Image (cartoon, rainbow, N blue to C red):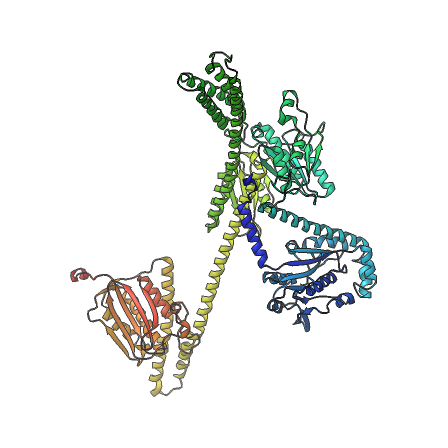
Amino acid sequence: MNDMLRPDPDALIAQLRNSEARAQRGKLRIYFGASAGVGKTWAMLSAAQREQAAGRDVLIGVVETHGRSETAALLAGLAALPLRELAYRGRTLAEFDLDAALARKPAVLLVDELAHTNAPGSRHAKRWQDVQELLAAGIEVWSALNVQHLESLNGTVGAITGVRVHETVPDTVLDEADEVVLVDVTPDELTARLAAGKVYLPQQAERAAQNFFRKGNLIALREIALRRTAEHVEDDVRGWRVEQSGAGAGGTWGNGKGRGLQAWNTSGAILACVGPHEGAAQTVRTAARLAGQLNVRWHAAYVETPRLQRLAAAERDRILAVLKLAEELGAATAVLTGADVAEQLAEQACRLNCATLVLGRSEPAAGWRRWWPAAAQPLSAAIAAQAPALDIMEVARADSSRRLSRAPLEGARIDSDDHEKAPTYWPAYAWATATSVALTLLCTPLASVLELSNIVMLLLLGVVGVAMRFGRGPSALAALLNVAAFDYFFVPPRMSFAVSDVQYVLTFAIMLGVGLLVGQLTAGLRFAAGVSTSRERRARSLFELTRELSAALESSQVVALGAAAVRGHFGGDALVLVTDAADQLVLPAEPPRGFDPQVADWAFRHGQSAGLATATLAAQPWHYVPLQAPMRVRGVLALSPAQPRWLLIPEQAQQLDTLARQIAIALERVHYVEVAQQAVVEMESERLRNALLGAISHDVRTPLTALIALAESLQTLPPEEHAYAARAIVAQAHELHALVNNLLDMARLESGIAGGAVNLRRDWQSVEEVVGSAIRAARTSLGSTVVQTALDPDLPLVEFDAVLIERVLVNLLENATKYGAPPIVVGARAEPGTLMLTVRDHGPGLPAALLGHEQKLFDKFTRGEAESATPGVGLGLAICKAVVSAHGGEIAAGNARGGGAEFTVALPRREPPEPAEAQL
């Protein structure tokens, strides 16, 4: 009993998390009314006055009085935020100041006109979005809302009143409100207030009375507002009941023994009890008609007991057809499992807060069954004993009614290993008989050795084994046979049913009772284990699919994983069809047998299931489910299950829908990952293009302009100055040549790195010679700059591409000339396994903005000074990094001791070969 009262740990954790989230978030109170003028703002301000009198910090963010003197009088004594002024199209608009409210952070903030559209330039487009930010900041907000401003009711109200409201609020805002205060007046009273000028000015009031404020409109709006408020209250009741049930609070249902919460007849919800008999369809139809007359929600449930689990396939199909009929009539269906039908139905009714149960009338038990206690008591009496507070309605059986069609499963293949088929009975009873005979033969030679009590234990063990393997009926037969065998073969006088001692009669009775009880309990445990295994299988398939889909990066992976998961759970064959770039369904090149591409395309275009076990094209052997993602349909899941009957079981249908939703979400995630990657590539390409165009427009155009000017000046310069102009033309041509070489080298290296095949002409080189040739090659750029060398005297030969490494040193020397100061020092030293090359200048060093981020210098089109007269396109250091990386080395930059910048190149090296090997 203590275990039954112990609260669910998961429910407690969820409740604590929800409580913590609610504690950090502000509360929202909405004053809700059928139309303008019912007194929402007046009621809100009146409550604010009471709260302020009680000592709470109440602040008015924005309140619209619409010129009503009674409402304006309630503003007295309440602090108010100044409105924020915004300029729009030559006018000044006054809007709610969100930032000021967040900074002030009062205990209660009044924000009227929840559906208001903010002026352009505001942070949020709608005022309800401002309220969401205030709630997230922990501020309690009070607001007002009319029913016509709800998004889901916008069209309905527009059709009734002929006025379409453009300012709307999502229904979730009202649904998630902590408190909804209904402000209601009768249509006659509202009309009188309108005529008295308490709603609008006289001219507006006259026009409103002829249009929106007609009595028929007001009655309809009032009904909608009352119903919408009732729905919110019903959600609150259901949420409270869930919390109390999870926490194990003292609410009770049924017989008041603390097993759950009692059903409250607040919503009038109905639960139809589907049985295995022919009249179940009539019960469903009656429940649907009753729910329609009362305009309430309704549910249908079928309880599968161990006995009903052994029904024939045709009878099980009839039950599933009844559940399908209930779904078509608007019910939420469920298949429950348990040994006690009355207990399961009572729990379901109280869980769903259904105060009325509709079930078929039970027929009186006939024959020997009338003496069986369980059969003598009708189901309605058993439910009444479990839950006295429930209203129970019995439906009479119809004399004649149409048989429910089994068309959804017609033509579907049924495999020979269909485990849904009812097991055959006689082999089980034969095995029970054989087990009793075997135990009797085994114990007969042991009768002289073992006590009779030990033989009884062996016979009871056989009953347990039969119950575990074959269920209740065979175990009962085994118990009876074992008692008879024990009396005939082991109790004196043996080989006779006569009993020498009357006490053995008690032994027989206890043995039979224990055997039957143990058999029943063991069979019940077997049934419960099967149910738990089925549930665990469904949960495991969802978990495995979710885990595998979370690692999928391509649509093909999602398709393969999704199809494999569906096949693993339902058997048979499954296909996941996705869309192409043109948003068209991609059909398989070789469709499997029975697959219809037109049905798949119909399910995709209409977003509805079709095919097997549906009301659309039900003759198809395949079941087609649209992959509905949050944004749009991403494809179709086609399934040809091994057991078509599973598609009619609500739990299995929900499992399939959940699998399809997980696949759709994964496809949408992969799609947007690809979109994001493409956007990043396009942004990077655009950035490189702009940088390249900027560099060319500045650094290439400058020498070209100089070349054109010098060439034109040759015509006018005297002959003695032609040599000077020619030298200037050569210098500018060298500079342009260097810029173009950098661009071409970078393109070649990038294409080589991307293709994974940079062509390096490695050879054993003298470091001194490469350094000397680099200084000579850079002499034009160096000009008169002094270059010093600090090379170790015993540098070994190193294997590298001399042309490319020379290019690295030339770029480093040119960079030092542009941004540093002389002298420039080129160093080289050999370390174990590494050749270290350094180029240092004695200038100001690296910019302060790059300290700690020195690797940014080696990015393409990056310069030490963003805006500078120093020529260059920012590719020299990028080329150096590409060349060094191609050699497997590293390049770094930093400030040297004593001032200046120092670039270090580390190249991997191995011991040089012998001289003879080097010559070869």
Seen in the picture, residue 763 relative to 294 is either above or below; the reply is: below
Q: x, y percentage for residue 519?
A: 52, 26
In-front residue for pair 777/849: 849
**Residue at the far left in the pictured view:** 916
> In the rendered image, is residue 613 in sight?
no
Seen in the picture, residue 552 relative to 364 is either above or below; the reply is: below
Residue 701 left/right relative to 111: left
Quarter of the image with the C terminus in it:
bottom left
In-front residue for pair 533/913: 533
Q: x, y percentage for residue 469?
A: 48, 27
Seen in the picture, residue 603 relative to 719 is either above or below; the reply is: above
> In the rendered image, is residue 189 in sight?
yes
Q: x, y percentage for residue 452?
A: 45, 19
Residue 868 left/right relative to 215: left
Instruction: Write down the quadrant of residue 167 in the picture.
Output: bottom right
Q: Residue at image x 25%, y 70%? A: 828
